[in-house]
Every structure is written in C-alpha cells, then in structure tokens.
Amino acid sequence: MRGMTTDESLFPVLLGPAWVGLAAPVRRAHGGRGSIALRGQADVVGSDNRAARLLRQLLGVPAPGAAQPLTVEIERDGDGEQWTRRFARGRMRSRLSAGPDRLLHERLGPVLLRFRLEADGGAIHWHLLGARLLGLPLPRRWLGDVLACSGAEGDRYAFMVEASLPGIGRWIGYRGTLEVDDGA
C-alpha cells in the first residue's frame, strides 16, 4: 500500500466499498486530497493516578479537561496521513498509514497500533488488534480495552475514544464534534 497516489486517500482504500455508506462529515474528514483542518471542542477524561499521567505524557495525549478547544490538522501524502491534534491542554501527533496487513497502522510516539476498520451506521469503528512498543509486539491482554468511533452529529464530524489498561483503569477518553474545513 505504500506509494498511494494522491487520488487514493487512506480511509477509502482501507474501507473499500463500505466507504460510500459513511455519513457525509466522515467522508469529508477522512477522504480527499491534500491537507484539511477540523475545529471544535472535546471533553477529555482520564484517571488521575501516576501511571495514567505518565502514559499520557509519554504518548503526547492531552490532560483531562472539559470543553477543550480542539484543532485537528490532517496532512496527506503518498504514504498516509500525519495528524496533529491541538487540545487546550496538550498536543498529540500521530502518523496513520496502511499496513501490509491491510490494517490501519497508527504510530503514536514509541507505540505502533494496528486497527481493523469497520463501517457501520454511517460511522467508522476502530478495532484494536495489536500493538508494538519500540518495534516489539505486545501481548494483546496488556492492551486493555480500546473503543473508538468516527461518526457524525448532524453536519459535524463526531468522535469518541476510550482506552483503559489493566491496573491503571481509564487512562484516556475523549469525545467531541468538529467542523470540517476542507475548502468545500
């Protein structure tokens, strides 16, 4: 999948024919060429224990806080997408690409996450299948529970991410809505 042409965005390639059933805000956010920006807000929650705070810091995930202004910039190139999320209480960057296994790969600091994407009800559900830390595979049971969904609320892009780990609990969760500024 490396060397995608600019006519083949990451998410349409990975979802195949299911792409056309997605809600319009989801297609606008995850399809097309070039760079786009999304603006809105998010509620961020997470445990206040030391391990959760350290994990958020290590991965560049924002600190908890309600109604945080949020800007998401997505820069597309021939090999995938660079996402920069600017929350009021932190900045999070990740690199998304299509793996040779036809899964979505997301690199977040020293961690590589592998997701199977599923389109359902106009939304994309992200199913975590595995992860690597500094290139070494992690046992699935260490990854805890991850729920993620990209959908729509009216004409706005809506998202939800929840992640919990054994012994730490819910270390991060965020949800909100964004306006898609795709120049349309």
Image (cartoon, rainbow, N blue to C red):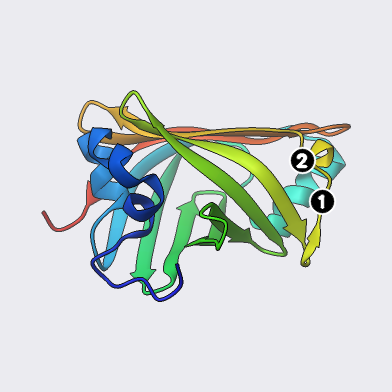
Q: Which three-letter amino acid code belongs to the residue tagged 2?
A: Leu
The residue at the far top in this view is 121
Whether residue 55 is visible here, answered yes or no, is: yes
Task: Determine which of the numbered discs, if any, sits on residue 138 in the image.
Answer: 1
Above/below status of 8 relative to 26: below
* Helix, strand or loop for disc 1: loop
Residue lying at 38% horizontally and 58% vertically, measured from the top left: 10
The residue at the far right in this view is 167
Residue 135, given in percent of the width and then of the height, sits at 77, 66
- Of residues 96 and 108, the one drawn nearer to the viewer in this rendering: 96
Q: State the CA–CA distance, disc 2 to disc 1.
A: 8 Å
Callout 2 environment at 10 Å: few (<14), some (14 to 19), or many (20+)? some
- Of residues 156 and 131, the one drawn nearer to the viewer in this rendering: 131
Q: Which three-letter amino acid code belongs to the residue tagged 1?
A: Leu
Residue lying at 23% horizontally and 39% vertically, measured from the top left: 20
Which tag, 2 or 1, sits closer to the chain's start? 1
Whether residue 44 is visible here, answered yes or no, is: no
Q: Are marks 2 and 1 in contact (CB under 8 Å)?
A: yes
Residue lying at 49% horizontally and 50% vertically, measured from the top left: 87
* Helix, strand or loop for disc 2: helix
Residue 180, given in percent of the width and then of the height, sits at 25, 47
Task: Determine which of the numbered discs, if any, sits on residue 143 in the image.
Answer: 2
Residue 32, given in percent of the width and then of the height, sits at 23, 58
